[in-house]
Image: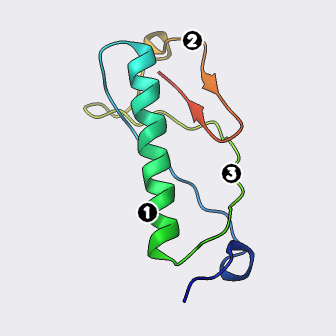
Amino acid sequence: MPRPAYTAFSRCLVFAGTADALGKSNSVDETQKSSRTAINKWKADNGITGPVSETAEKPQPHPYWRSEVDPRLLLPPDVVTDASYTLC
């Protein structure tokens, strides 16, 4: 049975994703779409029908092929919205 978000969960969850693309704007778009898909899937899997609170949180880079990302490789500025924080 579907439940409103406030009665089902009263905890914070972090959704993080990585996407690659040609160009920063495409990468940001794909990353934000991936995050939105993950949130929608979580809501569907848990029977959440109401709105949930979303807050941006600065992530740590998680590279595919290395143990860390050299700060000189990041493309400023970071892209920040009310609901997401994206590094490139």
Q: Residue at x 54, y 90 (%)?
A: 1
- Point out residue 31 in the picture as x, y percentages from the top left corner: 43, 35
Q: Nearer the viewer, mark 2 or mark 3?
A: 3
- Figure check: 43 above or below 58: below
Left or right side of 58 for 82: right
Q: Earlier in the sequence, mark 1 or mark 3?
A: 1
SS at mark 2 in the image: loop
Q: Determine which residue is flagged by label 3.
A: 54
Q: Amino acid at mark 3?
A: Glu
- Figure check: 43 above or below 31: below
Q: Residue at x 60, y 72 (%)?
A: 49
Q: CA distance from mark 2 to mark 1?
A: 30 Å
Q: Which mark is residue 76?
A: 2
SS at mark 3 in the image: loop
- Point out residue 10 in the picture as x, y percentages from the top left corner: 73, 74
Q: Determine which residue is flagged by label 1.
A: 41
Res. 7 image quadrant: bottom right
